[in-house]
Amino acid sequence: MVDSECTPIAFLKFYFQFNQETKIMYTILIEAEELLVAIGRPNTIIFDCRHSLTEPDFGINSYNDNHLPNAIYASMDEHLSQRPNGHNGRHPFPEIQAFIEWLKNCGVNNSTQVVAYDDAGGVYASRLWCLLKWLGHEAVAVLNGGVQSWIESKGVLEREVTQVPEKGNFQPHTKDILVDSQYILKNLNNNGVLVIDARANDRFRGENETIDPIAGHIPGAKNRFFKTNLDDNGKFKSANTLKRSFLELIDNKTDQQVVHQCGSGVTACHNMLAMEISGIKNSKLYPGSWSEWITDNVRPISTG
């Protein structure tokens, strides 16, 4: 006879109670198996960040088809960015007060455990992670492996639009993790500042550019395609594997100032998250990225 106290259900109940009592906080990644338990905790909010750069309605259509229980849709264009003005890149960071108000309307408090997910290896979920880190909110994690991992772990999906029961009272404590084009321009010849470009290798070299009107990269930048962070299952590689890779890229100088950029400040967040997983903290983000850089012909461009 199997002791009922040793069954998987009993274990999950124990683990849930343990989570409640110890107030476990997820600050980088959360596994699907962990979310199966944590999703029932009070003051936990899940955001569906699915998006496609080529299909504007992909995210909301995916959300309406199905989403994690009680998930709230986070639009890359409407919530996680502000409207481009032709000089601030394709996905400029949202205006801070508007973003804070949206978080409040979603029920977010300073104590809320936020979980972000997508279906693209964390590319878009990492944007929300980065935004909340910018505002000083530590309890935010990306679902490792996204919705695919959730399904594989027998997590259920639903179609009902989530109703937020009560407005939150989130208050920001902004952190100095962002740099602008002037900072990049001033430090082009500074060996202590390293720019890491998250775009595909061919776009970095100035080949096959189909998104932005000018091809190339910021002089002195090094290329690390964001997909390098993932294994064959679409999950982040181990912390040790990522750390070895990043240390090689930054010449083993963990104290070197690292700035992440990409085409529009989205996939750069994926590299930023990967560095956090590896244990290399406090890197920065250039939100405007390449799509902003090329709007001023004073800023130099490299190819090859």
Image (spheres, rainbow, N blue to C red):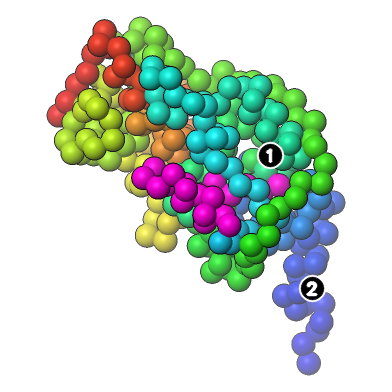
Residue pictured at 16% horizontal, 35% vertical: 207
Q: Is residue 267 visible?
A: yes
- Residue 148 or 223: which is nearer the viewer? 148
Find the distance from the CA under tag 1 to the CA under tag 2: 27 Å
Q: Is residue 39 above or below residue 177?
A: below
Q: Which mark is residue 34?
A: none
Secondary structure of the residue carrying tag 1 is loop
- Residue 165 or 156: which is nearer the viewer? 165
Q: Amino acid at mark 2?
A: Ala
Residue pictured at 75% horizontal, 25% vertical: 171
Q: Is residue 253 visible?
A: no
Residue 97 in the image, given as x and y percentages of width and height: 66, 22
Residue 95: quadrant of the picture: top right
Instruction: Answer few, some or many: residues within 10 Å of disc 2's Cα (few below 14, many 20 plus, some between 14 and 19).
Output: few
**Stretch of the chain drawn in magenta:** 45-64
Residue pictured at 28% horizontal, 35% vertical: 211
Is residue 207 left or right of 189 when viewed as pictured?
A: left
Q: Considering only order in the chain, which callout, 2 or 1, is on the residue closer to the N terminus?
A: 2
Is residue 3 left or right of 302 when viewed as pictured?
A: right
Secondary structure of the residue carrying tag 2 is helix
Residue 170 in the image, given as x and y percentages of width and height: 75, 30
The number of discs equals 2
Residue 12 in the image, given as x and y percentages of width and height: 75, 67
Q: Is residue 126 above or below residue 35?
A: above
Instruction: Answer few, some or many: residues within 10 Å of disc 1's Cα (few below 14, many 20 plus, some between 14 and 19).
Output: many
**What residue did someone put label 2 on?**
10
Cβ–Cβ under 8 Å for marks 1 and 2: no
**What residue did someone put label 1 on?**
139
Q: Is residue 148 magenta?
A: no
Q: Amino acid at mark 1?
A: Ala
